[in-house]
Image: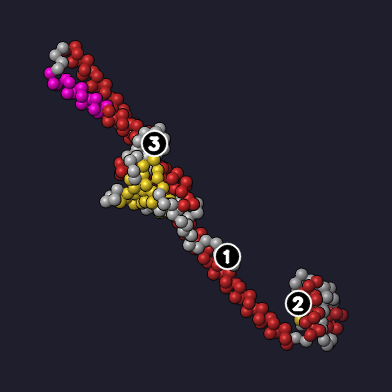
Amino acid sequence: MGRRGGRPRRGPLTAALELELRGAGGEPVDLWRTIQSHGLVDLPPMRIDDDARALEVTLPLRGAPATVRVREGRPAWAAVDGAPEAGAAEVSRLVAHVLRLDELGRDQSRFEHEIDSLTRKEQDEQTRMFDGSIVNAKELEALEHEIASVKKRRSDREDEVLAVLEIVERLEADAAAAERESIRLRAEAEEAAHSAAAELATVEADLARRTDERAAIALEIEPEVLELYESLRRQKKGIGAAALVDGVCQACHEHLSAVELDRIKRADGIRRCEHCRRILVV
Ligand SMILES: [Zn+2]
């Protein structure tokens, strides 16, 4: 009997799984900054290791959940330790998703780049305004307009980042809940497999005991009765004998006639049902 479920089998691990740190738009992504960003929660199935600047995450792989460690690798690459060899592609996809090297991550990263450059531009123009290099009043006024416009654009971008972060946080919360649920269900399935195996073992033991009991009883029965019984059992859907209760055969549920009942009462030897011909136990 093969038991399904049980401990997940641990296959060989990949020597070195690497993940290029680029967003869907090809922009570079900073691993440690992403790990520390708002969307990633330091809750199971994720753990942030500040000392090692690494992220441990339990991934819901199809074979069995696996805990991998994502750390900085060679420049522009993340190294992923602990990925099962058979699930390397799936691990890459899930880790990329966790690090949000996808649509939302890209948007956030792009907006943050834009805010950085707008902030620099604003600072440069503030400097120009006060370093005495501009003396013309009109030019000064134009510069003030430019600064106001840059401020407005930066504020808009910041609003967009906030909106994206809200979506990311909601999706992360959904994903964390789904992953917890998946881990709970796996545990439940494993538990069910265990109890099914235990139940089968009990039934098998019971069957063995009853087979022995039957063999012991068969020894005490006259050979011709046993032979008739076995032959009827083969012909009649596994039932060779039945009790007679209140004049009714318990196998075919037919009433025996008064004459037959009277005859059975007085007869010696094997009694049989007049309808189904099974042996009657009176
Ligand atoms: Zn009968």
Tell me which amino acid carries mark 2.
Ala
- Estimate how packed mark 2 is, as few (under 14), some (14 to 19) or many (20 or more) residues with alpha carbons within 10 Å: some
Quarter where residue 133 is shown: top left
Tell me which residue sits at (83%, 88%) in the image: 268
The residue wearing badge 1 is 2
The residue wearing badge 2 is 242
CA gap, disc 2 to disc 3?
77 Å
Q: Please provide the residue range marked out in magenta.
A: 118-132
SS of the residue under disc 1: loop
Q: Of the two numbered discs 3 and 1 on the same chain, state the one appearing first in sequence.
A: 1
The residue lying toward the viewer, choosing from 25 and 194, is 25
The residue wearing badge 3 is 23
Side (left or right) of 81 relative to 155: right
User: Would residue 52 be counted in the magenta stretch?
Assistant: no
Quadrant showing the N terminus = bottom right
x then y, percent, for residue 277: 83, 75
Q: Is mark 1 within 8 Å of ligand 1?
A: no
Quarter where residue 241 is shown: bottom right
CA gap, disc 2 to disc 1?
38 Å
- Estimate how packed mark 1 is, as few (under 14), some (14 to 19) or many (20 or more) residues with alpha carbons within 10 Å: few
